[in-house]
Image (spheres, rainbow, N blue to C red):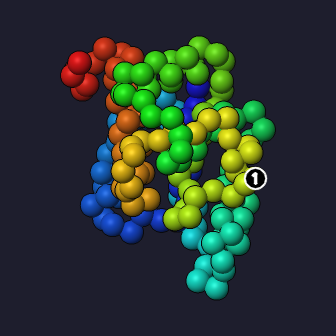
Amino acid sequence: MNLKLITVGKTDDAILQELIQKYCNRLRHYVNFEFVELADIKKAKNLSEEELKQKEGELILKFVNSMDHVVLLDERGTQFKSVAFADLMQKRMNSGIKIMVFVIGGAYGFSDQVYQRANQKLSLSKMTFSHQMVRLFAVEQIYRAFTILRNEPYHHR
């Protein structure tokens, strides 16, 4: 299985960029992993929330293929403990999914079209985090899932 993480906008914090890259590199030892940072929408300040979500959604959907399994990181998604998330990843791999795409939207969430395309919604926490920090948490948890599946010592049970 191939994994892709799509994010809206660039990570502008150098420390977060470094940490995200660290976990992306670690993750690539287990799976073909692609980290996609989509450009911010130009003149976003002139758009309403709905218009911005629509434009971001159109951009996101350009990077999603019809056969991809799409997981939105969304506050209304299902929450998992790390071991249960690893089990979910294993089930998806066993089911024959070729590409699993995780998506982190913009500040206002996703357009209706993106929600309709999604196969699943995942919440990392009931707390609110910046979209830039969520990128780090997401890639670290995906990495952690693979270390759990391989019984490596990174995750302490």
Q: Count the marks: how many?
A: 1
Where is residue 11 drawn, in percent x and y? 42, 63
Where is residue 106 drawn, in percent x and y? 55, 62
Q: Secondary structure at mark 1?
A: helix
Q: Quadrant of residue 125?
A: top left
Q: Kindly identify the amino acid type of the residue bearing the numbered disc 1.
A: Gln
Where is residue 120 drawn, in percent x and y? 62, 35
Mark 1, Cα crowd under 10 Å, few <14 / some 14-19 / many 20+, is few
Does 120 sit left or right of 146 as displayed? right
- Point 73% across, 60% down: residue: 58
Q: Is residue 100 above or below residue 20?
A: above
Camera sees residue 95: yes
Does 38 sit left or right of 129 as displayed? right
Q: Is residue 103 above or below residue 67?
A: below
Q: Nearer the viewer, residue 12 or 72?
A: 72
Q: Is residue 15 above or below residue 156?
A: below
Q: Quadrant of residue 50?
A: bottom right
- Point 39% across, 46% down: residue: 126
Can you say which quadrant of the picture contains the N terminus?
Answer: top right
- Point 39% across, 17% down: residue: 149
Q: Quadrant of residue 70?
A: top right
- Disc 1 target residue: 113
Can you say which quadrant of the picture contains the C terminus?
Answer: top left
- Point 21% across, 22% down: residue: 156
Does 101 sit left or right of 127 as displayed? right
Q: Is residue 130 above or below residue 71?
A: below
Camera sees residue 43: no
Where is residue 152 drawn, in percent x and y? 27, 18
Point out the residue furthest to the right here: 66
